[in-house]
Amino acid sequence: MLELGSLQRDALCEIFNISVGQAAASMSQIINEEILLSVPMVEFYSVEEAAHYLERSSQRVCSVRQSFDGSFHGNALLIFPEARSLDLVRLMMGNSLPIEQLTELEQDALSEIGNIILNSCLGSLADIFKQPFQCGLPALHIGSGISVLKECDADHVVMVLQIQFSLASRELHGHVIFIMNANSLDLLSEAINQFLGTMMVQS
């Protein structure tokens, strides 16, 4: 299991706070309501630990998955508890259909929310680490926390970012997770160290 020092974790939190801030500005324009996003925590889990973590958060979740490939590769997912997953979509669409009546248009809207947030996170990593990524198309999945991770190998490591959504009318919580193998996690650690080294030289 990859262990990051406190300085590395702080750097990751700051990087992702910048990226979700950019995503929040884009989403605020879409729904015409101010959204504030923050990443208060970054944690690393095994696949089994991550599955239990997601099951504890909610028995069923909605997730938007995107693959990414660059100097390190894996899958990035935006995850909401099922019962709350349509709150942002309803703000965008202006309706109140129950989740079992999720229409194709609403599925597209939920996928677009995931696309905005995940691309913002990956774009920030690419800019800061100066390492471009190729991203796949977003794919929507609704099911248990374990089913979200069903395609993972046992040796994969899961990086979990807690995401807090603050709106004037409500507060939502979700997660962005990155699923990578051990080699990709090592490369991520090296990229963080190079970034920190550059920052120290500049200061």
Image (cartoon, rainbow, N blue to C red):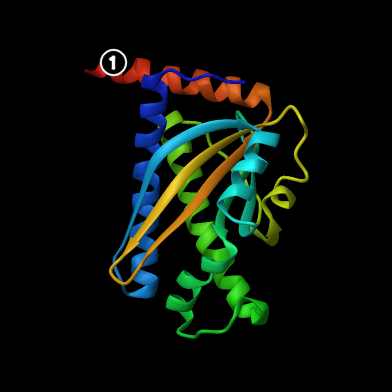
Residue at image coords 43%, 17%: 5
Q: Can you tell which quarter of the image residue 201 is in?
A: top left
Foreground pick, 196 / 140: 140
> Which residue type carries mark 1?
Met
Q: Say which quadrant the C terminus sits in.
A: top left
> From the viewer's perspective, is 48 left or right of 114?
right
For residue 170, say whether it is visible: yes
Element assignment for label 1: helix
- In the image, residue 58 above or below residue 86: above
Q: Residue at x 43, y 41 (%)?
A: 124
Q: Is the residue 25 above or below the residue 45 in the image?
A: below
Question: Residue at label 1?
Answer: 200
Query: Which quadrant of the figure has residue 53?
Result: top right
Q: Position of residue 118 (x, y in %)?
A: 52, 50
Q: Whole-percent x and y of residue 94?
A: 45, 84
Task: Report the quarter where the N terminus lies.
Answer: top right
Residue 43: percent from left, percent from top? 50, 33
Identify the residue at horizontal 38%, vertical 35% (top origin). 13
Given the current orientation, which residue lies at the most extreme left position? 203
Residue 126 image offset from top left, x and y in percent: 48, 37
Q: Residue at x 44, y 56 (%)?
A: 173
Total of numbered circles in the picture? Answer: 1
Would residue 151 appear left or right of 9 to someone viewing this image?
right
